[in-house]
Image (cartoon, grey):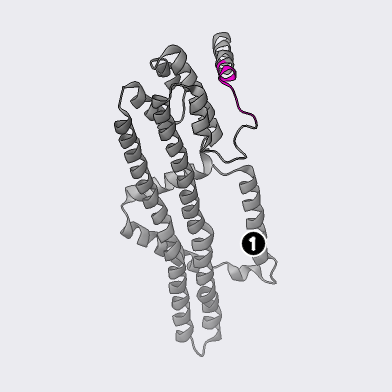
Amino acid sequence: MMSKLNWVAGILFTLIFASSFVMTENPSLFMNGLGLAIVVSGTLGAMFFSYPSSDISAAIRVARNTYLVKTPSADLLVNTMMDLAVQRQHHGILALEDAETDINVSFLKRALSLLIDGYKTEELRDILYTEMYYFKQRRKHNERLFRHAGHLAPAFGVAGSVIGLIAMLSGIGDPEVIIRSIPLALTSTLYGIVLGNFVFIPIAENIYAKTQRELLMQKLVTDGVIAMQKEPSPYRLTKKLESFLTPAERPGNDKTFEEIREHFKRLQLEEEKA
């Protein structure tokens, strides 16, 4: 999910960019419905000839989610798995079944269900890594779709310019035809460049960046759950999980096992009061 700073900065600089057109002596010169129709219809037509409609709709949903759905932070996952490790030590592995229902991170929930079902370490690693691999492949396909659209839009902008130039040549000797054709020849290229580099390519890059963050979280969950299976001590497990965090994200002071246990007791009291 994009932060507030991203949204504010993005909207601000978009307004500045748009105002550069409005502040000219004749802003209406940049408005050309035919040029916009050529670029948009050409790009969308080529996209539907390139990909199944189901792939296009799936890519649009993924793009929407990358902007609106927040990815859990690494420190939140570390703290969650630390609490789960304490519950497992105090109440056994079946205690994770109750905790699983309260977790809203689908990959962590999947990993916990495999742990509860008694899968061995290698089986657990193989299943989760396979899921990560195909998740990456699906996201790469979505990213490629928008990147392909980003390459198509400028090309159809050039096509619109060629159409405008042909119209100008056909009107040699008639100033009115030339005047009507010049905006089409120039604005089509402008529309294609803006649509490709200000819409489609940024969406593709955002999908890529979000995918890398989610893969890192999934790697953390996978190694954390495997460590939870092999490491009986929550304190040692915490030290292993902290290696996934940047130095700035790591706790300023080391927690002892007693502090971890007290933290779990406080969680239990909060649940009982609720």
Q: How many marks?
A: 1
Vertical position of residue 146 compared to residue 54: above or below: below
Q: Is residue 266 left or right of residue 85?
A: right
Q: Quadrant of residue 107?
A: top left
Q: Residue at x 46, y 73 (%)?
A: 158
Q: Residue at x 43, y 48 (%)?
A: 60
- Toward the viewer: 83 or 136? 83
Residue 268: percent from the left, percent from the top?
54, 12
Residue 259 belongs to magenta span: yes
Give the residues drawn in magenta, as a range. 253-261
Q: Is residue 263 left or right of residue 221?
A: right
10 Å neighbourhood of mark 1: few (<14), some, or many (≥20)? few
Q: Residue at x 31, y 35 (%)?
A: 127
- Toward the viewer: 144 or 53? 144
Residue 101 shows up from this direction: no
Residue 211 belongs to magenta span: no
> Which residue is the extreme one toward the top?
272
Residue 25 shows up from this direction: yes
Residue 38: percent from the left, percent from the top?
44, 67
Which residue has dot 1 on it? Answer: 17
Quadrant for the N terminus, please: top right
Residue 23: percent from the left, percent from the top?
70, 66
Which residue type does callout 1 highlight?
A: Phe
Could you tell me which secondary element the residue under label 1 belongs to?
helix
Residue 239: percent from the left, percent from the top?
52, 31
Quadrant for the C terminus, please: top right
Vertical position of residue 124 compared to residue 159: above or below: above
- Toward the viewer: 160 or 180? 160
- Toward the viewer: 201 or 247? 247
Q: Residue at x 42, y 19 (%)?
A: 96
